[in-house]
Image: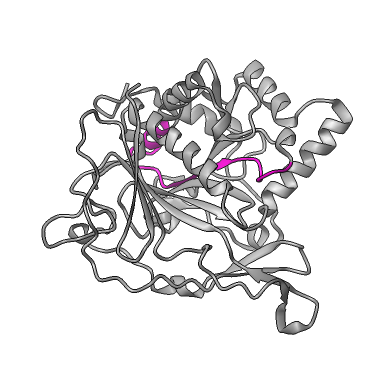
Amino acid sequence: MSVLRKTSRRLADGREIVYFDDTPDVPERTAVDSRDLPEVTAASEIRRDPLTDEWVAMAAHRQTRTYKPPADLCPLCPSSPGTPSEVPESDYDVVVFENRFPSFSQGVDDPGEGTVDGAGIVPSAPGRGRCEVVCFTSDHTGSFGRLAPERVRTVVDVWADRTAALSELDGVRQVFPFENRGEEIGVTLSHPHGQIYGYPFVTPRTERMLATAEAYRDRYGRHVLGDVLAAERASGERVVAEGEHWTAFVPPAARWPVQVQVVPHRQVADLTELTEAERDDFARVYLQVLGRCDGLYGKPLPYVAGWYQAPQGTDRNLSWLHLELLSVLRSADKLKYLAGSESGMAVWINDATPEQIARRLRAVGDVDHGTGAAG
């Protein structure tokens, strides 16, 4: 593993940009952002739904964010003469910068906690947090699944670095690194990238998972995900890929047409606690998963992939880090829509069994990451 060099700079509007270089002998990152940018303004607010007790974010300023630009004007590509972008340098390995259109920001006005209309029914608060963009490669036509294992290993280190950094920020309660891929998911920038959200609250799904883990521990004295992992490894029926430190499997109650959980064999609370060997092994296992996903229908699979981590400063003993990948594509040319039952009642109906999903993914075989071809 090459030494990772980290360089923090500022963009023209004051946002932070951080370069992570794993290529040896890369020149110092000194390029200056030449754009004339207006000051970033974020008016994020969070409100707690009194019927479900869940926080909802309001970020109307995001309506003006960049939408499907042509490839030669991609804001995530390196800058070139006459075409400045979000990345001032002419090339990069991995780069992270503050989102220009953030859902949560450290810069929001802070009128303090209150209620909507002062009626005392709907709690409200500033959307104080942080949102970052992570560019996995400078290659506009690439994808995460075609990265070399060494670059995936760098990205894991970057995720861990940003998890630690965002966890220290004012108001951040939970850090969520994720990748949206494909127009079917709603992606508006095709350059290979992900995002990292520093939420000002513990997300509803995390609250539910922690409550379930606590109840299971109180009853059985063990972690529920640890028992699920052991059962999946013993059965093998839904396992998609496995390494020394990680196992990827279709969850036995999968909701989505394609859904895979990638789980470490050791309980850790977040990415910062992973060992060097665990980070290396994740790169190998996850690339197998992505290769099989892309081979499933013979075309790039649209997906959402995100990390479930412990909230900041609480419930770390109830958390078991894992990544979950899901896709809305239920066949090569059909999407799963979240209609009445799913959207209205949160009752999921899957058109395939988890066992069928796993068999299809295993049938794809492994991928040669030198060529990107399935073997």
| 147 in relation to 327, above or below | above
Look at the image and tell me whether residue 326 can be seen: no
Return the residue nearer the eye: 37 or 153: 37
Q: How is the image coloured?
A: one colour
Q: Residue furthest right?
A: 219
Asked if residue 225 lies left or right of residue 96, the reply is right
Look at the image and tell me whether residue 330 can be seen: yes
Q: Residue furthest left?
A: 81
Asked if residue 250 lies left or right of residue 192, the reply is right
Question: Which quarter shows the C terminus?
Answer: top left
Return the residue nearer the eye: 62 or 360: 62
Percent of width and height locating residue 288: 42, 26
Residue name at image x 64 percent, y 49 percent: 349
Residue name at image x 53 percent, y 29 percent: 358
| 110 in relation to 99, above or below | below
Residue 293 location, quadrant = top left
Percent of width and height locating residue 329: 46, 48
- Magenta stretch: give its range: 290-314
Asked if residue 362 lies left or right of residue 135, the reply is right
Q: How many marks?
A: 0
Residue 24 location, quadrant = top left
Q: Is residue 307 magenta?
A: yes
Residue name at image x 44 percent, y 33 percent: 157
Percent of width and height locating residue 187: 39, 57
Residue 33 location, quadrant = bottom left
Q: Is residue 275 magenta?
A: no
Return the residue nearer the eye: 194 or 254: 194
Question: Which quarter shows the N terminus?
Answer: top left
| 235 in relation to 346, above or below | above
Percent of width and height locating residue 299: 33, 41
